Amino acid sequence: MDIAQKTAEVLDSVVALRRYLHENPEIGMQTFKGTKRIIEELRQIPGLEIKDLNPGCIALLKGKGPGKTLALRADFDALPIQEESELDFASKIPNACHACGHDMHGAWLVGCAKILASMADQFNGTIKFLFQPGEETLEGAKHMIANGCMENPKVDAIIAAHAWPFAPAGSVALRSGPMMASSDMIDITIQGRAGHAAQPHRSIDAVFIASQVVTALQGIVARQTDALEPAVVTIGTINGGTVRNIIAPEVTMTGTVRCVSKEVRKNIQTQMERIVTNVAQAFEGKGLLNYELGTPPVINDEAMVSLVRAAAIQAIGEENVRSIPSPVMGGEDFSLYMEHAPGIFFRIGSTNDDPRTHLIAHNPKIRFDEKALEVAMKVLCQAALNYLQ
């Protein structure tokens, strides 16, 4: 029996699991019920060794003989959003919903475990199934790695896929090299001196200085970064002042930095420190920057892309395999696994004729075509077999 037939056999149970996770979303590192349900499903599969990380878990599947170790990863946390999809199985939890498709990921990886466990006599080596919480908060991969998911046995390569509302259900999309951006967090404090709004020359206006800093920071991308290198500097919040006729003594700002090059990432941090300090100093204020490194860019390994592309052609046909022309500037903590082993992060199409399937991820009205579950299982399982045979 081949992968397509085995996928058909498990599909109903995978759809049911997806709908359970969708109805019962959990945010960040609080995915305790989801972890319990996934482990219940995994314990019904012969041959798996399961490690409960609560939240999250690792399942180990050994083939017929010694060989390499491949990890397949799925996140299954939700977002703090009130769902508006009007699905029959919409979220039952206020202000929590799966608007990014992670319920699909968790379900299809359980399906992969079922399929590959029934084919363990067809490959050598080991498959690790990583069920990760906290991707949206960028905490989950660190948690999984700290709990040894990339060791004992050491992972030689890793694969992950994500539901994608920019390609039709039934298709996959891939690219080599930079796939997603780094995601760093910035906190800026501008310190001045309070005074009367009618006599600004007797004060140090933190609001004015902050506005100059915001403008100057945009020059990092516009004038101090190669125009062919994708980069984003965004100030998302700015807070200062209490009333209209008092010069504000302090302003705080928060933001994010995204880029796909490690060199550009380092340069942006250096330039940002210089601008915040010196612009504030030029107007007799003080600028303080806290630059917190989040996740590095996702850079797909060329050999792993070739592996998955060939597997996808084999599993769903060449006409359903697409190329992604440019990186996406969103971040993904999958990049942290890639510091331990070469890997690939690719996309599973999830749109159909319903306009709601074409909405951008994180929209409360978004829907995902469940055909993506079938496609993901076929491609991931075929890639695993090809890697380990």
Image (spheres, rainbow, N blue to C red):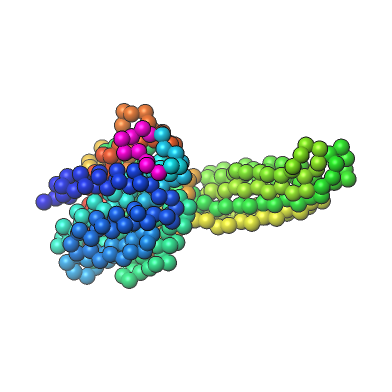
Magenta span has 88? yes
In front of the other: 174 or 57: 57
Front residue (pair 312, 74): 74
Residue 5 visible? The answer is: yes
The answer, for residue 357, to whether it is visible in the render is no
Query: Viewer-proximal residue, 84 or 270?
Result: 84
Would you say the magenta stretch is mainly helix, strand or loop?
loop
Q: At x 30% / y 46%, what residue is drawn?
A: 20
Q: Is residue 277 magenta?
A: no
In the depicted structure, whether residue 167 falls above or below residue 253:
above
- In the rendered image, residue 188, in percent from the top left (x then y), is placed at 67, 51
Residue 225: x percent and y percent? 60, 47
Question: Residue 9 location in percent, x, y?
Answer: 15, 47
Count of marks, rendered view: 0
The quarter of the rendered structure image containing the C terminus is bottom left
Q: Give the residues drawn in magenta, as a range.
A: 85-93
Q: Residue at x 20, y 59 (%)?
A: 45
222 left or right of 112? Answer: right
Q: Position of residue 299 (x, y in %)?
A: 43, 53
Write the residue at 40% across / 50% down. 26
Picture residue at 57% right of the left edge, 49% below the top: 257
Vertical relation: 312 (above or below) 118: above
Left or right relative to 172: residue 7: left
